[in-house]
Image (spheres, helix red, strand yellow):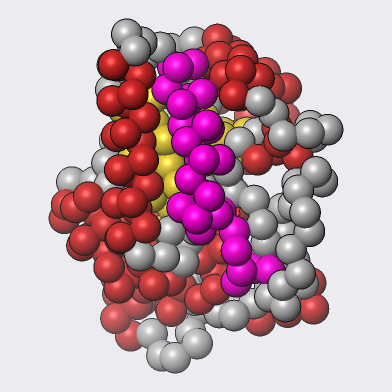
């Protein structure tokens, strides 16, 4: 199997009907970047910056952060990388930060909420990123955005940092794109607006499923209580894909679902064209892409969803289709 996947490495990632599917890696530490060459991935679709903060003994200084990001840019070469601002809080605490006593950390003070309430922290990180990028293109995305206003406030902080750097004679990124993670269900009902203001979207299916089905992603006892291939989940993904396409806003899926061949196949049928996943998933997902007809999956899903009853899962129909390929 491993041999077989390795043989696919340099093949273009095209479905049988010629649809190009971008395959990207999720990363967070410099060692993860070595998987780029080995997997032939198109770039990094999600760089989780909090991992470098979690392994540090104290809060990295501005200069240290800049050095870290410079190393990321050096390792990635000409390939694109999407860097996510700190996603701390919830299940990801920094050992050197005071512990938050919260009843429901997953719903608490975390991610972009901390960034907006303590803009100094966010500003330092953004400045380090902008400086490290130098004149290269830069893609930044914000985690756990719940309202369009949170995104526009975060964007305003980036704009201020850019103005500050250019006043001081630093080169700005040649192209600076800002994205929102779609992982809080409230954004599903602001899709047109967020797709209008964001330069790109990235679906965090781990959190989106957790909040949509009220199922703790860390709790195995409830892990089987929902199916990401059920009609309600797929309808949510379809809403995102349609709104993104309608606004001409690129949308990637970067949660675990994108690394599972059957699930990723369903997402291709819904219109997604870019996935970011762990290194071990690239081979199996690419094998699926090469065997699948995007138009056929789209028709299958449309017809199955049209007749789906409450709680209905498309898994059996999709599995039958995949087996027949
Ligand atoms: C997600 O929520 O799906 C995601 C990609 O981010 P994380 O797993 O880091 O929360
Ligand atoms: Mg998340």
Q: Position of residue 316 (x, y in %)?
A: 54, 73
Residue extending farthest to the bottom is: 310
209 sits left or right of 57 in the view? left
In the displayed structure, 132 sits above or below 5; it is: above
- Residue 113 inside the magenta-drawn segment: yes
Q: Position of residue 137 (x, y in %)?
A: 35, 20
- Residue 129 inside the magenta-drawn segment: yes
Q: Residue at (72%, 78%) from the top-left corner?
A: 103
Q: Residue at (59%, 24%) from the top-left corner?
A: 62
216 sits left or right of 188 in the view? right
Give the camera-side residue of 104 and 279. Answer: 104
Chief SS of the magenta region: helix
Is residue 108 in view? yes
Q: Position of residue 90 (x, y in %)?
A: 67, 61
In the displayed structure, 197 sits above or below 11; it is: below
Which range of residues does the magenta coloring cover?
A: 105-133
Q: Which quarter of the picture shows residue 74?
A: top right
Give the camera-side residue of 92 and 321. Answer: 92
In the displayed structure, 112 sits above or below 106; it is: above
51 sits left or right of 8 in the view? right
For the N terminus, which image quadrant? top right
Q: Position of residue 177 (x, y in %)?
A: 31, 33
Q: Residue at (34%, 77%) from the top-left corner?
A: 305
Is residue 20 in view? no
Give the camera-side residue of 248 and 90. Answer: 90
Q: Residue at (32%, 43%) from the top-left corner?
A: 155
Give the camera-side residue of 20 and 290. Answer: 20
């Amino acid at each position: 199997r491993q041999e077989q996947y390795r043989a696919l490495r340099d093949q273009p990632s095209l479905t049988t009907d010629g649809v190009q599917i971008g395959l990207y890696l999720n990363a967070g530490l410099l060692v993860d970047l070595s998987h780029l060459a080995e997997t032939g991935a198109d770039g990094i679709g999600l760089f989780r910056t909090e991992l470098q903060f979690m392994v540090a003994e104290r809060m990295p200084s501005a200069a240290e952060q800049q050095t870290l990001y410079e190393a990321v840019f050096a390792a990635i070469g000409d390939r694109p990388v999407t860097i996510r601002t700190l996603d701390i809080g919830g299940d990801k605490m920094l050992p050197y930060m005071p512990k938050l006593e919260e009843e429901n950390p997953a719903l608490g003070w975390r991610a972009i909420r901390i960034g907006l309430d303590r803009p100094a922290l966010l500003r330092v990180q953004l400045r380090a990123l902008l400086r490290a990028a130098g004149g290269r293109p830069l893609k930044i995305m914000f985690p756990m955005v719940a309202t369009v206003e949170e995104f526009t406030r975060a964007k305003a902080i980036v704009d201020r940092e850019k103005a500050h750097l250019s006043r001081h004679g630093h080169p700005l990124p040649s192209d600076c794109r800002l994205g929102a993670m779609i992982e809080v269900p409230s954004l599903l009902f602001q899709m047109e607006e967020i797709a209008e203001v964001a330069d790109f979207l990235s679906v965090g299916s781990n959190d989106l499923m957790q909040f949509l089905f009220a199922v703790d992603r860390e709790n195995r006892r409830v892990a089987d209580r929902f199916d990401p291939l059920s009609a309600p989940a797929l309808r949510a993904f379809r809403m995102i894909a349609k709104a993104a396409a309608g606004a001409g806003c690129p949308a990637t899926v970067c949660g675990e679902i994108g690394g599972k061949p059957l699930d990723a196949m369903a997402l291709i049928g819904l219109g997604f064209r870019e996935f970011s996943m762990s290194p071990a998933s690239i081979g199996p997902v690419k094998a699926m892409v090469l065997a699948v007809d995007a138009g056929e999956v789209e028709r299958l899903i449309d017809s199955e969803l049209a007749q789906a009853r409450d709680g209905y899962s498309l898994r059996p129909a999709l599995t039958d289709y995949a087996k027949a390929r």
